[in-house]
Amino acid sequence: MLFNLRSAATLFCAAALAAQAEVPSLVAIRDARVVPVKGSVMEKATVVIRDGLIADVGPSASPPAGAFVIDGTGLTIYPGLIDAYSTWGIPQATAAAPTATGRGGGGTQAILSALQTGQQAPRSQGPEDRPGTNTWVRAADLVRPSDTRLEAARSSGFTTAMTFPRGGLIGGHGAAVNLAGATGGAMVVEPSIGLQMTFTPGGYSGFPNTQMGILSYFRQLWLDAAHYAQAKSAYAANASGIRRPDYDRALEHLAGYPRVLLPAPNPIQLERVLKLAGDLKATPVFYGVQEGYRMAPVLKQANAAVILNSRWPARERDSDPEQQDSLRTLEMRDMAPQSPKILAAAGVPFAMSSEGAGAPRDIIRALKKSIDLGLSKEDALKSITLTPAEIFGLAAKLGSIEPGKIANLAVMDGDLFDDRTKVRMLFIDGVKYVPAPQAPQMPGGPGPGGPPGGQRPGSQTGETDEEIIR
């Protein structure tokens, strides 16, 4: 028994030392099929990674001396996939409580206290209460590598997400985050990529509670922000004899956003939010575009980009079989999966979102359905790689396999849109991750087992095709 305990202790120490081993900073994947997205597919090429960046790629690239070399024979390398509108990286994002008021703070705590005591949430009397306005919330401050959804995302080939906080009418500032890292700060690629807005009130009662009221409130909010900035400037220029302006947390953080994300599920709402974006003098990106097949001409004329949900409309399994669906409903079910093809033909940039998807792999399955309906594989691949990077101004860092870009790569054993294809390994910021083996789902259980996160940086377990070139 003593021998067994000592053996176990020895194995534990060895595992601990292995976990602390330095991740190679110079890696080469040789003789793989490389799909760079920008440029032609290379049937046999080498990708060199140095210090977390792509150093070289091409048929003539060769592993430098001292590189950790991976034999890529029979493997295909794609850019790491990107979710264009997500909450990945924010633990328990769906359970986050929305904020009632923004002026002076305290809105979130007021709602939490009301929920705990059974009291009614605070009632908004008007725009001065800043209802549902969480402009000070930043996804970059909330992301954590402990989010249990990240392992499933990585196992499907995703390395990056455009992550936005949710809650209220303005959820806050989104961030581009890599889906692995030692800390939340290490995951952040870009801390401010846009301001998320919605027309669904939550967490308060009173004004505004209609779409027209919300549109008016947004316009008033931006007018108040301009007046607030002028008052602060006047006070800073001559504080003597001028009453200082009251601090307004919602207005204080209503700045520094490169674009606004606005919901546009149908042509009528698209017309409204296009007008709103013009009034706010903001660059819009439209999400939740369920009827993109009807909106392509207007979107093209507006030079707008869109984010499509990956869950195409379908009849509910437990719906009444005798129920007669409307012609509009039937048309949407039939045409929604054709939206990517129609948008691509019109020249409208579109990206895909995990919003509404049951699993990360469902995004790829949704695109496969669109491919079967005429969407090209090239446009499908761009919608989860280069196009989201372009929409959010990050094409110099992400979205394709080019020297100088972040080494986010998905290494697969086949074609991305083939259900039989498995992700063999990922590189995120140049660090290798091997997807955890999927355990069979237990009856009544929440899903495959395994520890939260499940990331294994630099893991080489069970691999025999690697060597050190000296």
Image (cartoon, helix red, strand yellow):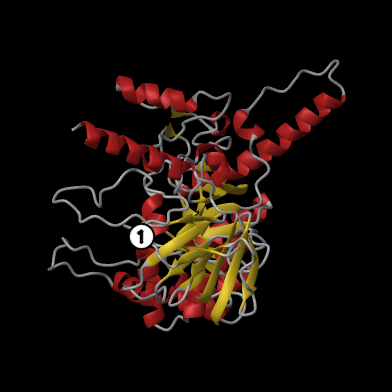
Residue 133 seen anywhere in this rendered image of the structure: no
Q: Quadrant of residue 216?
A: top right
Question: At x 50% / y 71%, what residue is drawn?
Answer: 77
- Of 456 and 325, nearer the camera is 456
| Rendered-image quadrant of the C terminus | bottom right
Question: At x 61% / y 80%, what residue is drawn?
Answer: 59
Where 282 sits versus 330, above or below? above
Residue 147 in the figure: left or right of residue 262: left
Residue 400 in the figure: left or right of residue 106: right
| Rendered-image quadrant of the N terminus | top left
Q: Quadrant of residue 3?
A: top left
Residue 87 seen anywhere in this rendered image of the structure: yes
Q: Residue furthest front?
A: 3
User: Callout 1 environment at 10 Å: few (<14), some (14 to 19), or many (20+)?
Assistant: few
Q: Quadrant of residue 221?
A: top right
Residue tagged by mark 1?
Answer: 462
Q: What x and y, as percent, mark residue 114?
A: 36, 23
Question: What's the residue type where badge 1 is placed?
Answer: Gly
Q: How many marks?
A: 1
Numbered disc 1: secondary structure: loop
Residue 435 in the figure: left or right of residue 126: left
Q: What x and y, as percent, mark residue 159?
A: 49, 57
Where 301 sits versus 90, above or below? below
Q: What x and y, as percent, mark residue 309?
A: 42, 62
